[in-house]
Image (cartoon, helix red, strand yellow):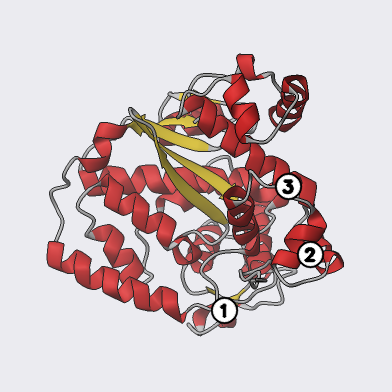
Amino acid sequence: MAIKLKGYERDSSFIAARHQPAILLDLGMSRGIDSHLLLRGTQLFLDDILSGHKQISPAQFLAIMANVHKRLDADDTSFLYGQRLLPGHLGDVSQALHHAGNLRQALQHLCACHALLSPLLTPRLVESRTHAFVYWQDSCGAGSMRTFLVEAGVTAVAAMTRWLSGERLPWRFSFMHARPSYIEQYWVHLGEDLAFGQQLDMMVLPRAWLDRPWQNTSAIGLQTALAGSRAQMDALEWQESFLDTLYNHLRRHIRQPLHLDGVAEAFDMSPASLKRKLQKHDTHFQEQLDLARKHVALYLYQVEGCSNQEVAHYLRFNDINNFRRSFKRWTGCAPGHLQPACF
């Protein structure tokens, strides 16, 4: 039976301008940049933000981000922005983070409510026997702003968890982009346990930290905030992005033959319509399928401890050499050359 491919897209207006976009604007204006320059090309004015009612699209949010990044021309912009993001001032979804009893509750809530708390970059929590991993995915086609978003996202979580726990957690960070020239900003805001040119944008720490109790919490406050969070999420037209919905479908059916026509049919749309949606987000079907296969393979290797033969079999490759070639296309390296803790 066909299902609807629901999810917000680049041009879906649902992001409250008075919250995270306003934080970004305020950061730019605090350094003397005129609001007209920061809002150029967005079809927005400062009065729209100040009205308290304006909802904007991911495309508009990304345009504001690009303007702030360009006009400030400062290496610390993404990190300072990230420090201001979480728990935030988004009502109950923010209060639930504030009242979380431990890291697991905070991360699970962040992932469940990412459409409100992190609409442009989706966090996903994975656990092995020894470690917890939070990896980040582009929700709407961030393009040149992806590195900025990742820097802000990991800084937001690191700063929030340090504040809520009362101590600096032993996060390790891996990034898909190359080591930047402004590495000192990473050292200042994230520490020195960093790796660049990796398979995932990811934060890692020992699993024991997930359930370590936090002191300044309220069980009643958490439960009421979670109830309010569910109401906030239910009021949204979308719980996740178009790219998230597609990715989740591909992951669920990764052991089946997957092709554009079949996936389009599963979502009750024409192949041409699915291609247009993907093009709007600066991607294509094979790229999304390869991404899903790559993540499954990394999980099987480094969380489940599977062999080459087992991973190839799981992904329905009959020829091990064909699998190795495909894996190298997905990751840029042979399976035996994976860096430790890619997942």
Q: Are marks 1 and 3 in contact (CB under 8 Å)?
A: no
- Residue at coordinates 50% horizontally, 28% vertically from top-left? 184
Give the Cα distance between marks 1 and 3: 39 Å
Name, please, the residue furthest toward the right: 272
Q: Residues within 10 Å of mark 1 (few under 14, many from 20)?
A: some
Give, as a three-letter code, the residue at label 1.
Gln
**Dot 1 corresponds to which residue?**
55
Element type where label 2 sits in the image? helix
Q: Is residue 248 above or below residue 319?
A: below
Q: Is residue 270 visible?
A: yes
Name, please, the residue furthest toward the top: 336
| Quarter occupied by residue 281 | bottom right
- Residue at coordinates 52% horizontally, 30% vertically from top-left? 300
- Residue at coordinates 62% horizontally, 21% vertically from top-left? 309
* Viewer-nearest of discs 2 and 1: 2
Give the Cα distance between marks 2 and 3: 17 Å
Q: Nearer the viewer, residue 187 or 94?
A: 94
Q: Residues within 10 Å of mark 2 (few under 14, many from 20)?
A: many
* Viewer-nearest of discs 1 and 3: 3
Q: Earlier in the sequence, mark 1 or mark 3?
A: 1
Q: Which mark is residue 274?
A: 2
Q: Is residue 29 above or below residue 49?
A: above
**Dot 3 corresponds to which residue?**
257
Q: Is residue 186 above or below residue 249?
A: above
- Residue at coordinates 45% horizontally, 81% vertically from top-left? 235
Q: Position of residue 75 (x, y in %)?
A: 57, 40
Give, as a three-letter code, the residue at label 2.
Leu
Give, as a three-letter code, the residue at label 3.
Pro
